[in-house]
Structure formats: structure tokens, C-alpha cells
Amino acid sequence: MYRLIKTTMTSHVLMLSSSRAGNEEYLEHAKQPILSHLGERREVLFVPFAGVSIGWDEYTQKVQTALPECNVIGLHTFAEPLRAVLESDANNQAILVGGGNTFHLLATLYHHGLVEPLRQVIGGGTPYIGWSAGSNICGATIRTTNDMPIIEPPSFNALNILPCQINPHYTDFHPPGHNGETRDDRLQEFTRLNPTTPVIAIREGTALLLSKGTLSLEGTNDGFVFLGESKTTIKAGQDLTEYLR
């Protein structure tokens, strides 16, 4: 019999596809979902490790400007980031993880010994919000990221909050005259080699929400699940809890 992974019953996780939708301002479309997800919490630990072309102080300030209702503190400013993560719930803090390069994010998390502690605090109920790379690491591995492997993490294994794969920024647009592989081609390469592992592809402006043991697609655009040789449409608001099994 299938059973939900134990930690998904207490996890409260918002996985945004992107920080922007169309021509909107930074985190504009995501602001209300973020504040709603935080509940009464307004203290936020921000993990800027996916940032490569932007300094981490600057990145933290960028998020603070976009979320003036919150007090955003960069995890990189702590002498003991591990302790800060482990004490986040006791300090009534949530954890935000921004986008950028997924390989750099995961490599830095491994460097600081934060992968398992993050998994523990998220499983314990500390609210988590990620976008782009910050959502990618919520899957079992980062093997379906869109990013270039600019650095080699010790492992591709990620937080495994969802026991499947995530593909943020999904698009099926094929530029005229472009002869390289499409996103569908790349994802189907993965599912051909891993035919029993679902990949949930979410368009910009949408998000996956895991709360109270239920997974759903939030937003107004459809997404897709790639599994084996199939590509299945998932509707906005659809219950995706079967992918927690």
C-alpha cells in the first residue's frame, strides 16, 4: 500500500516557478501568496546562495525591498548558519530560498552542511518558500533543473521534500529556426532513463503548494507531468497529492 512520506504531513512549502511573471516587478505576482503562506510570521531567513552574478548582500536587500512587510535576514550573515537554520522555528522565522543557479545553491548548502538540517526543519513544520532554484531543490534531485552546471555539488540529491522531480520556468515555446532540443525533449530524455519518476513542470506565475499532506498546483496556468513516455496536463488548483507517494 502506498503511504505519504512522513514529513510531507507536517511540511508547509510553497514552490514558486519564478520570481517574475511576464513584465511584472520582482516578486510582484508572488507577494500575496508569500504573505499568505507565512501566516503571522514576518521574520524571514533568506538563503541567497543561488546568486552568482549578484552579491548576497545585494540579493537580500532586493528581496527585502520586494517584501517590506517582512524582516529579511540573509543566512550568509550568520557566523553559524547551521545554528540559524536549526533555531528558525523557535525564533518564529520562515525560510526563503531565492533563484539563480541551482548547482551553486546546492553546492553551497552541502558546503555548510545544511541539506539534512533544512530537510529536518521543513519536515518539522517551519514554513518554506522557494522560487526557481529554491523550488528545484525541493525535489528528490536537481537533475531536471534548467541551469548550467557551473559548479559540481557533492551530490545531485536535494531536499527530497517531494519524492519526484520539479521543472520550474517550464515553457513549450520553440523559437523559429532553433535547432536545439526543446524543454520537452530534455525532460523526456530524463523520463526515458527514469521511467517511474514523475517530473512536475510548472509555468512562470504558478507554484506548487504542499500543506497538510496535500500537494496542489496554484495559479491560473496549467502545468504538466512527464512520466515515462507520457505528458499529462495538470490544471490550476488540481490535487497532485498522488505524487507524494
Image (cartoon, rainbow, N blue to C red):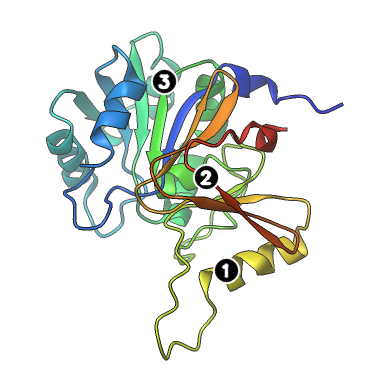
Q: Residue at x 58, y 33 (%)?
A: 239
Local SS, label 1: helix
Q: Residue at x 74, y 64 (%)?
A: 229
The image shows residue 184 at horizontal and vertical percentages of 57, 68
Q: Residue at x 35, y 49 (%)?
A: 99
Question: Label 3 amino acid?
Answer: Arg
Residue 78 visible somewhere in the drawing: no
Task: Give the image quarter of residue 27.
Answer: top left
Question: Label 1 amino acid?
Answer: Asp
Nearer mark to the viewer, of 1 and 3: 1
- Label located before the other in sequence (2 or 1): 1
Local SS, label 3: helix
Q: Which mark is residue 83?
A: 3
Q: Left or right: 213 with respect to 66?
A: right
Residue bearing the label numbered 1:
184
Q: Residues within 10 Å of mark 2 (few under 14, many from 20)?
A: some
Local SS, label 2: loop
The image shows residue 71 at horizontal and vertical percentages of 19, 23
Nearer mark to the viewer, of 2 and 3: 2
Q: Is residue 174 above or below residue 18?
A: below
Q: Residue at x 57, y 58 (%)?
A: 144
- Label located before the other in sequence (1 or 3): 3
Q: Which mark is residue 235?
A: 2
From mark 1 to mark 3, how far is it between C-alphas? 41 Å
Question: Label 2 amino acid?
Answer: Lys
From mark 2 to mark 3, how far is it between C-alphas? 40 Å
Nearer mark to the viewer, of 2 and 1: 2
Question: Is residue 164 or residue 99 the one in the foreground?
Answer: 164
Q: Left or right: 70 with respect to 171?
A: left
Q: Is residue 99 above or below residue 53?
A: above
